[in-house]
Image: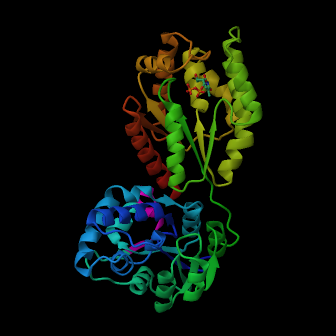
Amino acid sequence: MSRFPYDAVVFDLDGTLCDAEKGIVSSVRVAMDRLGCPIPSGVDLRVVVGPPLRDTFRDLLGVPEDRVEQAMALYREDFDTRGRFLYSVYPHIRQLLRMLRAGGVHVALATSKPKKLATDILDWFGLTPLFTIVMGELDGPEKLGKPELIRRALPDGCGHPVMVGDRKFDVLGAKAAGVASIGVAYGCGSVEELRQAGADVIVHTTRELCQVLCPGATAPRGFFLTVEGPDGSGKTTQVDRLERNLRQFGFEVRRTREPGGCAISEAIRGIILDTKNMEMCDTCEALLYAAARAQHVHQVIRPAVENGELVLCDRFVDSSVAYQGGGRELGVETIQRINAPAVEGMLPDATLYLAIDHREALGRRLAASAPDRLEMQDTGFHSRVQQAYERLIGENPERFLVVNAAQDRDAVEKDALEAVVCRLAALEQR
Ligand code: TYD
């Protein structure tokens, strides 16, 4: 028994769970272009999202019947290699799927896309494990149709099933299958279209959808992800890219950094990194990092994680262990001890480590910008930092995701994203 109003929810994919417009529209354009068929004037290409594409090419875009298969093949080729990577998961959808799963609801997908393609897209986003069943169309010209896809997506004996979709095809399909329907007006269909088709409920945002499907539920706990690496590992660039990519994947990202992340801790950062403060003793430095961290955990990190967000933090306590414990030789245990009250059990769920030898990193750093007080340390310091990091990784193999940061930026970005999404998807299933 589910504690929510519907015990089985069948979702449409494009325009309902994912913003598919950019990907589909641009691949339709490429197909029409390669086919040598101009797009009829006055056609708003957004309407291609949702209905079966064969019909769209023939009926809406005027492709002659005998060239429709060729149009489909050209579309598929571009979509598989490029278009589908322009998809993004709408905000709150990941949380919604987790809440439904935790509430014992049967969560299904019923899409007009071929099943293999739908599964590839869900896999790429790390969403497949959150579904009980994925139903997609047959590969050839023979089609099951929405009503049959919906019927097959439902388990025997469910009491209150519902279909969620953004187009009239979803609503009409639900009716034909004898299932209630929720129309989402944030996708590609208008409120008018959904109303005319006879949607039982219409929602305008994904937040509203959460309220209808999981009334009274609070967002599940979020995640705490940190990024570490030696100075010169390209960390800032990679955190920028990771933030952008994780948003595309539908995570509610709260980007922050250490030292800093809130007003008090940013003020402490200014003191620590100021090149005028050369007389600062090592213990003072270590305690200032811990003080900045205490405020940051209290004011930003813990509340955001409890609120369901994904906190993406550029450096955390591992940096203190590596730089003050290793680099400054204050000792790993001492640093862990002074940080215990600051961290207060708020340890990262995963830590991305950008691995690069400190000598190679030094070259990159010197080429980039004027060094700050910490970056001005000798190579012995940076070698000890690296050793301390390596020890931490050895002691926490299940937490660290190690990526080779000596590769070019795009390769590091790809490896980092894959590793992080794989880990977060595993955590989402808990
Ligand atoms: P950061 O601004 O992240 O520098 P970069 O972008 O070059 O990585 O960090 C500033 C410096 O602070 C960096 O040299 C590492 C150091 N640091 C510590 O020594 N201990 C700590 O606890 C933290 C968080 C940073």
Q: Viewed as shown, does residue 31 lie left or right of 306?
A: left
Q: Residue at x 25, y 77 (%)?
A: 140
Q: Disc count in the image?
A: 0
Q: Residue at x 50, y 69 (%)?
A: 15
| Position of residue 229 measured from the top left corner of the image (x, y, whole percent) | 50, 29
The correct choice, above or below, for 215 with respect to 228 in the image is below
**Start-end of magenta stretch:** 123-135
Q: Residue at x 50, y 23 (%)?
A: 388
Quadrant containing ligand 1 reads top right
Q: Viewed as shown, does residue 100 lie left or right of 75?
A: right
Q: How is the image coloured?
A: rainbow
| Position of residue 341 measured from the top left corner of the image (x, y, whole percent) | 72, 33
Q: Does the magenta segment cover residue 167?
A: no
Could you say which quadrant of the image residue 280 lies in?
A: top right
Q: Does the magenta segment cover residue 127?
A: yes
The correct choice, above or below, for 310 with respect to 155 in the image is above
- The residue lying toward the viewer, choosing from 269 and 389, is 269
The correct choice, above or below, for 77 with respect to 316 in the image is below
| Position of residue 185 measured from the top left corner of the image (x, y, whole percent) | 59, 74
Q: Is residue 316 visible?
A: yes
Q: Viewed as shown, does residue 94 lie left or right of 87?
A: right
In which quadrant will I find the N terminus?
bottom right
Could you say which quadrant of the image residue 272 lies in?
A: top right
- The residue lying toward the viewer, choosing from 62 and 16, is 62
Q: Is residue 5 visible?
A: no
Could you say which quadrant of the image residue 56 lies in?
A: bottom left
- The residue lying toward the viewer, choosing from 2 and 404, is 404
- Of all residues, the one furthest to the front in this rendering is 41
